[in-house]
Image (cartoon, rainbow, N blue to C red):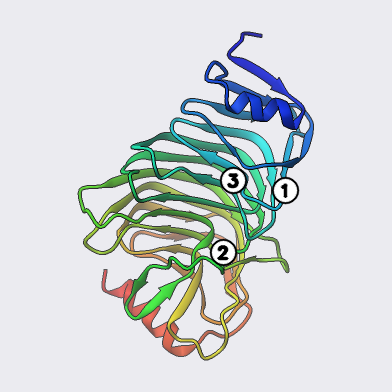
Amino acid sequence: MSNSEKTISTVEALVAATGDEAVRHIIISGAIDNLPTIRLRPGQTLQGSGRDALLRFADNDGVELSSNNRISNIRLETSPEKRAIFNDTAVDTIGRAELAAVTTIGRVQILFRDKLRAGHVEVDGLDIIAADARAETDRPKGYGVYVLQGAFTLWNMHADESIIISANLVGLSAGRDGAPVRGSGIFVSGGGDQAGRLAVRSLETDAVYSDGGIKAGTPDQITGGVFTVYGTYVDAVHNRGPVVTYGVNDMVLDNWGPWTAGPPTRRSRPTDQAASALSILARSTN
């Protein structure tokens, strides 16, 4: 094994490896508990060495991406309302951020704002077992409604139309039947109708179960099982698994662009009629 690759099995070794610029590839062996938040250095990768590879964080966020990072073949656990994976917005570019065969308890949130103005996000297999995004106060607004963020959130928040973020998102799933994620399920957004854009080649989901937890009689808030918001340009959306929503004002699918739905979708509770009408209007005018 070269000096650039380290196999890790303790908290101390992992913290040291993420701070060592000579370490490029971090390999996790077994389960490591009670971790602080860790930040991957530019160019570092994090991967599991087997099916039991697990990072379990204390009551804090998990792994912070910087630029050109890859996380693969691993399970990450924190509290559902915390972020299992998030990113540094003080860097110039995220480069190519890759997630492959990753399972989480806790949200995955990738935001482009502040100094961060460029990059590509590639997901090939991401299963979010449990997550709760309801406390996030940043919510895009359009057509008189606010949209709650999701278990998975990818959002180009810039107002500048010249800032275009690219992505390819395949094999995303969230929640379990009878145990949905809270807030939206899969959420992708640009900065607005005339603002920063999110260009997605493919958005492909497996099973998604979500409950926004919105109180009845709140027509200005909505969520979606799979929600592509304004400023998002998706070449194709494929729902290869069921998409089920449980709460008031929870849209099942909400999208402005080509959409292919496979297995049946369903709502388990009625939606607020005003919110539903606003959602239909949003789709039909784009």
At horizontal 69% and vertical 51% (from top left) the residue drawn is 78
Quarter of the C terminus within the rendering: bottom left
Which amino acid, by three-letter code, is at mark 2?
Ala
Mark before the other along the chain sequence, 1 or 3 = 1
Tell me the tag on residue 110: none
- Identify which residue, 148 or 114, lies in the foreground: 114
Q: Quadrant of residue 72?
A: top right
Label 2 to label 1: alpha-carbon separation:
18 Å
Mark before the other along the chain sequence, 2 or 3 = 3
Q: Which residue is mark 1?
A: 58
The reply, left or right, for residue 56 in relation to residue 106 is right
Residue 48 visible to the viewer: no
Mark before the other along the chain sequence, 2 or 1 = 1
Q: Which residue is mark 2?
A: 133
- Identify which residue, 11 or 210, lies in the foreground: 11
Which amino acid, by three-letter code, is at mark 3?
Leu
Q: Residues within 10 Å of mark 3 (few under 14, many from 20)?
A: many
Q: Residues within 10 Å of mark 1 (few under 14, many from 20)?
A: some
Q: Quadrant of residue 210?
A: bottom right
- Identify which residue, 160 or 272, lies in the foreground: 160
Q: Where does the image place residue 69, in percent across and percent down from the top left?
A: 50, 31
- Identify which residue, 116 or 260, lies in the foreground: 116
| SS at badge 1 | loop
Tell me the tag on residue 126: 3
Numbered circles on residues, count: 3
Which amino acid, by three-letter code, is at mark 1?
Ala
Label 1 to label 3: alpha-carbon separation:
21 Å
Residue 198 visible to the viewer: yes
Instruction: Tell me if residue 230 comes above or below residue 19 in the rendering.
Output: below
Q: Where does the image place residue 180, in percent across and percent down from the top left?
A: 66, 66
The reply, left or right, for residue 265 in relation to residue 43 is right
